[in-house]
Amino acid sequence: MNWQGILVYAENYSGSINRASFELLGKARELIPKVGGDVYATVVTNKESVERHSKELVAFGADKVIVYTVEEMLLPNPVVHRVALINAISYAKPRLVLVPATPWGRSIAPRVAAAIGTGITADCLDVYIDENGDVVQVRPAFTGNIIAHIKTLTNPVMATVRPGVFPLPQPRYDRKGEVIVRDVSVPNADSVKVLGVSKKKAVKLSEAEVIVAIGRGVKSKEDVKLFEELAKALKAQLACSRPLVDMGWMERDRQVGFSGSIVKPKLYIALGISGAPQHIAGMKDSKYIIAVNIDQSAPIVKYSDLVVIGDIYDIAKKLLHALKSSQF
Amino acid sequence: MDIVVLIKPTPDITKVKFDVEKGVVDRSSATLEINPFDLYAIEVAKRIKRLFGGTITSISMAPPHAEPALRDAIARGVDRAILLSDKRFAGADTLATSYTLAAAIRKLGHFDIILCGEKSVDGDTAHVGPEVAEFLGIPHISFVTRITSISRDTIVVEADFGDAYYEVELRLPALVALSRPVIFKEEFVEPSMPRVSDVLRAKRARVEVWNADALSDVANASRFGLAGSPTRVVKAYYALEKGRNARVVRGDEGVAAILNALRELGVVL
Ligand SMILES: Cc1cc2nc3c(=O)[nH]c(=O)nc-3n(C[C@H](O)[C@H](O)[C@H](O)COP(=O)(O)OP(=O)(O)OC[C@H]3O[C@@H](n4cnc5c(N)ncnc54)[C@H](O)[C@@H]3O)c2cc1C
Ligand SMILES: Nc1ncnc2c1ncn2[C@@H]1O[C@H](COP(=O)(O)O)[C@@H](O)[C@H]1O
């Protein structure tokens, strides 16, 4: 009865489970008929939340929930989560371990893989079972230029999976599941002390439905206001390319791309952005892409659905005018 | 302080050619240079050295033609550059790469802090730093955006956990993986081009090359390279080929087209 089933690591360092964990449970339910065994979820939580979190994880698809309870203070401590995940793996002996490819997940999961000596694949866009019954992981490499399909020869197969690539399943609170409460002792938990939240994120672009993104086509920090106004009129989030962050005109959290956020909105409007590969890597999976640029040969043209050749100031002002006038 | 910097020589992603048919990378099409994120690791290392003294040693696992990238590291302020290069290291995935890097660090003997980049532009995993820390049995912290303070025994950093930035204190020795932009105390860290005199000095400097045998007393050779790699690429293809065939419009017609699209997508009524 070894190396069966799928274990999903439910990310919870703040007191609420990251929704990407639920997406992975949905995927696990889809894969489980081909893998065999149960869908496990494991979560580190404080005593008060054990019931709430287990119910949630069962509702989203877990058959069994492996729970580790810790003092509130230790919840955001990665050392504790590392030990818990190793323990959960040795208990469940799953064939596949799925972890959200958030900064947190990409920090914990590789340590666990190294500790147990198994292979791990980063930032996957898909996971499927091939005709031989092997787990195949699909991931981008070379700043998104290459897509690779990867198999792992060791057990368990471990993967961090990009948030938002699988749909959020419909929770069913009438689902039944087993809750297994386990204990771990954490040696060296004090080698890492989490002192607290130092700064909230200005925005979570990965969850935005509509994004207005500006690039070096914007000429001064003052001018950012015009595009902020346009974003507001469209109930969109304002985002940017990297140079605007480097110049200090925009916050780091608003940068889209390889070294910023990966986004997948319903609509992405790129204003004065040339479309460097590092920017494209962050937004190419948006459902509909509009680009405004004075240069028809800009690379962004290739990745867009609608391209307007023109001045971003001119277009933004006219759009604002139209949106405010009575015809809308 | 004995500072180790992990530097990955990587191709410039905007210059490298991809074989669109085979989905492979023509590695001879671009020279190797220091992974852009690792430049921040070098800069932070220099600031730590300024405060405490000590040496900065860089370690890279790469083919022999990565040597110019290591000279660049020396020109930028690394005291000692080690290139791990051997056919037996080839084909390594993150597990084998980290195992080998950790072995080399162990071979160095004493160290106080290891700095590396958040991720590499080719491997793109962000997994190597944490795996190295695991193999060495030391704490680590990834996605660091600020070094708040550092003493001989501890470092306090601000790290991006995903939902928020957290303040974290680590006991040294530890591994710190740096994002960008990164702040050292109150100052923005921006890598700058090395001076000509430093480039000339680096030309004459020694780059140490270690092969698999050099690590035989600290590692098990069966865990190097492809043999030590549990993951296998079974298929690869070029991802950016399919364009979207954009409709291209100009001027005021453009404004109308955008408004139309906004309506069709339900963004405005
Ligand atoms: C390791 C690494 C990571 C990186 N990560 C990222 C990342 O995450 N995100 C990112 O964005 N970049 C990233 N970059 C930078 C990237 O390579 C480009 O430099 C950057 O994306 C360019 O930004 P841009 O398109 O705004 O500027 P430019 O390339 O200068 O393009 C400006 C565009 O605006 C157009 N324009 C100018 N004026 C007007 C006007 N009045 N009206 C209409 N159009 C106008 C121009 O025709 C041009 O196409 C990274 C680079 C490296 C090396
Ligand atoms: N072959 C290597 N040699 C030296 N350092 C490396 C190597 N591979 C990865 N690293 C380090 O690990 C970081 C993360 O890389 P990656 O896991 O490939 O995204 C890089 O920024 C480097 O600092």
Image (cartoon, rainbow, N blue to C red):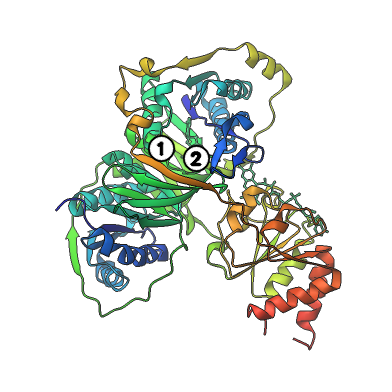
Question: Marks 2/1: CA distance?
Answer: 9 Å
Q: Do tag 2 and tag 1 residues touch (Cβ < 8 Å)?
A: yes
> Residue drawn at (60%, 41%), measured in percent from left and top?
B18
Residue B264 placement (x, y as % from top left):
66, 80
Nearest the viewer among B219 and B89 is B89
Mark 1 Cα shell of 10 Å, populated few (<14), some (14-19), many (≥20): many
**B174 w.r.t. A196: above or below:** above
Please report whichever mark, 2 or 1, sits nearer to the chain's N-terminal start.
1
The amino acid pointed to by label 1 is Thr
Residue A46 appearing in the image: no
Rendered image quadrant of residue A75: bottom left
Residue B259's place in the image compared with B50, above or below, is: below
- Give, as a three-letter code, the residue at label 2: Gly
Would you say the beta carbon of the disc 2 residue lies within 8 angstroms of ligand 2? yes
Mark 2 on the same chain as mark 1:
yes
Farthest residue, direction bottom: A326
Question: Looking at the rendering, in which quadrant would you find the C terminus of chain B?
Answer: bottom right
Dot 1 falls on a residue whose secondary structure is helix
Q: Residue at x 57, y 68 (%)?
A: A208
Residue topped by disc 2: B123
Res B94 label: 1
The part of the image, by quadrant, that contains residue B253 is bottom right
Question: A198 and A314: which one is in front?
Answer: A314
- Left or right, B174 with respect to B68, comes to left
